[in-house]
Structures are given as C-alpha cells and as structure tokens.
Amino acid sequence: MLQLIENLPGNVVGIRAIGEVEDDDYEDVLVPAIETARAEHDKIRLLYVLGEEFTGYEADAMLEDAKLGARTFTAYDKIAVVTDATWLQRTVKAFGWMMPGEVRTFHTDALDDATGWISS
C-alpha cells in the first residue's frame, strides 16, 4: 500500500510504500496527492520512501506507475527515492537522467537528509 507522508511543504508529495503496492494505491493515494499539488504549484517534488516494510509491486501497479509517469513527466522539479534496495537504487540511477528534474537516491538511514533536500 501507499501512505502519504504528512508535514511536508505544499509542493512536495511524500509517499511511503508499505508491503505490496497495488494498482488501486495509485488511484486512491498517489494520483490525488499529485493532482492536488499540481493544482497549486507549477512544479512539484516527490519523496518516495521504500523502506524495510516494502515487499514489492503487484504487476498492475507497475503499469499504473508507468502511466502516471507519462502523464506527469514534466511536472517534477526534484525526486528523492529513499531505499536500501540495491536494485531500486541502480534502476533510479540508470533512468534518472531521463527525468527533466533532479533525481537522487538516499539510504533509509538518510531519510532526514532526503526530506531536507526535497524540501529546500
């Protein structure tokens, strides 16, 4: 599931992945949060935390992720991905250059650093 992270600036959407992320999580949590932030800000920022509680993506969730990325591709100023999963860090680094905004990865013990960077 996806859970909103509270107490962030209005242009920052914070999401924590817990357990398995399903396609409904995008429509119920992430898409409304992004649409709200985009209605108020030209550029938004995304803090995406995939900690120890994260177990993976349902196949349909990966499709929803790709569709959301295509719809909101130019909306992001910064993206911070917080994870200790090596495969996720490598994937973000391999494809992050394609994003129009700045993308960084952080280890889970550096969540405060990621929050500070995405908020500044």
Image: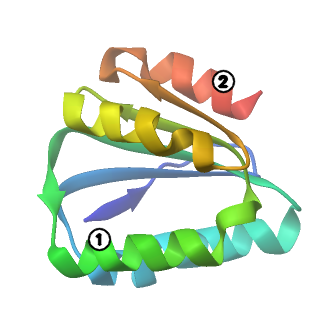
In the figure, is residue 79 to the left or right of 57? right
Question: Can residue 85 be seen at all in this image of the molecule?
Answer: no
**Mark 2, other Cα within 10 Å: few <14 / some 14–19 / many ≥20:** some
Q: Circle 1 — which element? A: helix
In the figure, is residue 46 to the left or right of 22? right
Percent of width and height locating residue 51:
24, 36
Q: Is residue 3 above or below residue 36?
A: above
**How far is the residue under mark 2 from the one under mark 1?**
26 Å
In the figure, is residue 77 to the left or right of 103? right
Percent of width and height locating residue 31:
54, 77
**Quadrant that contains the C terminus:** top right
Q: Is residue 99 above or below residue 70?
A: above
Q: Is residue 43 above or below residue 64?
A: above
Q: Circle 2 — which element? A: helix
Percent of width and height locating residue 61:
27, 75
Q: Write the residue at 54% across / 25% down.
A: 114
Q: Which residue is mark 2?
A: 117
Res. 33 image quadrant: bottom right
In the figure, is residue 95 to the left or right of 60? right
Q: Which residue is mark 1?
A: 62
Could you tell me the amino acid type at mark 2? Trp
Q: Write the residue at 66% across / 71% down.
A: 72
